[in-house]
Image: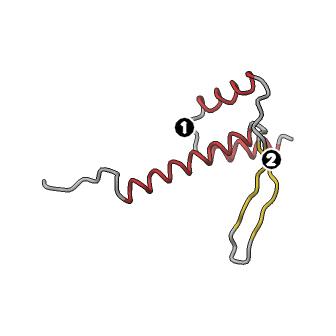
Amino acid sequence: MGGTKKNGNGKNGQKKKANVAEDSAEFIIMALLLADQLKFQSILVDREGTVAITLEGQIKKKDQTSAQKMADFLEENGGMTLDEAIEGLRLRLEGR
């Protein structure tokens, strides 16, 4: 009985928010790669083994149908895992 509950405002709450933001950013990057809005530019590896991947792109307002397709994709695949997104990207790159 008398147990304490955390309300998410402490360190755990901040960590959870950071993870959600990180996951959202990864999903957005994957979606932009799949939509040909981002292109791979380079991979940098420093002496300590830190890896930096550079992507380059421009978000253009081509036409409403392209924007609507992206919005539909994000709506339909909002529950997609990062592994599934990477697999989709791999399959798309193999198809070229």
Q: Nearer the viewer, residue 5 or 94?
A: 5
Is label 2 in a helix, a strand or a loop? Answer: strand
Q: Quadrant of the C terminus?
A: top right
Q: Local crowd at mark 1 within 10 Å, few (<14), some, or many (≥20)?
A: few
Q: Are marks 1 and 2 in contact (CB under 8 Å)?
A: no
Q: Determine the residue located farthest toward the left in the rendered image.
A: 1
Residue shown at 74%/43% (left/top)? 33
Front: mark 1 or 2? 2
Q: Determine the residue located farthest toward the top in the rendered image.
A: 65
17 vs 1, left or right, is right
Residue shown at 83%/40% (left/top)? 95
Residue located beneath label 1 in the image: 79
Question: Residue 86, image x and y in percent?
Answer: 68, 47
Is label 1 in a helix, a strand or a loop? Answer: loop
Q: Local crowd at mark 2 within 10 Å, few (<14), some, or many (≥20)?
A: some
47 vs 22, left or right, is right
Any mark on residue 1, and which?
none
Q: Nearer the viewer, residue 50 or 81?
A: 50
Q: Earlier in the sequence, mark 1 or mark 2?
A: 2
Question: Residue 28, image x and y in percent?
Answer: 64, 42
Residue located beneath label 2 in the image: 39
Question: Residue 29, image x and y in percent?
Answer: 67, 45
Q: How is the image coloured?
A: secondary structure
Say what amino acid the circle numbered 2 marks. Answer: Lys
Q: CA distance from mark 1 to mark 2?
A: 24 Å
Residue shown at 39%/53% (left/top)? 13
Q: Nearer the viewer, residue 45 or 94?
A: 45
Say what amino acid the circle numbered 1 marks. Answer: Gly
Q: Determine the residue located farthest toward the bottom in the rendered image.
A: 47
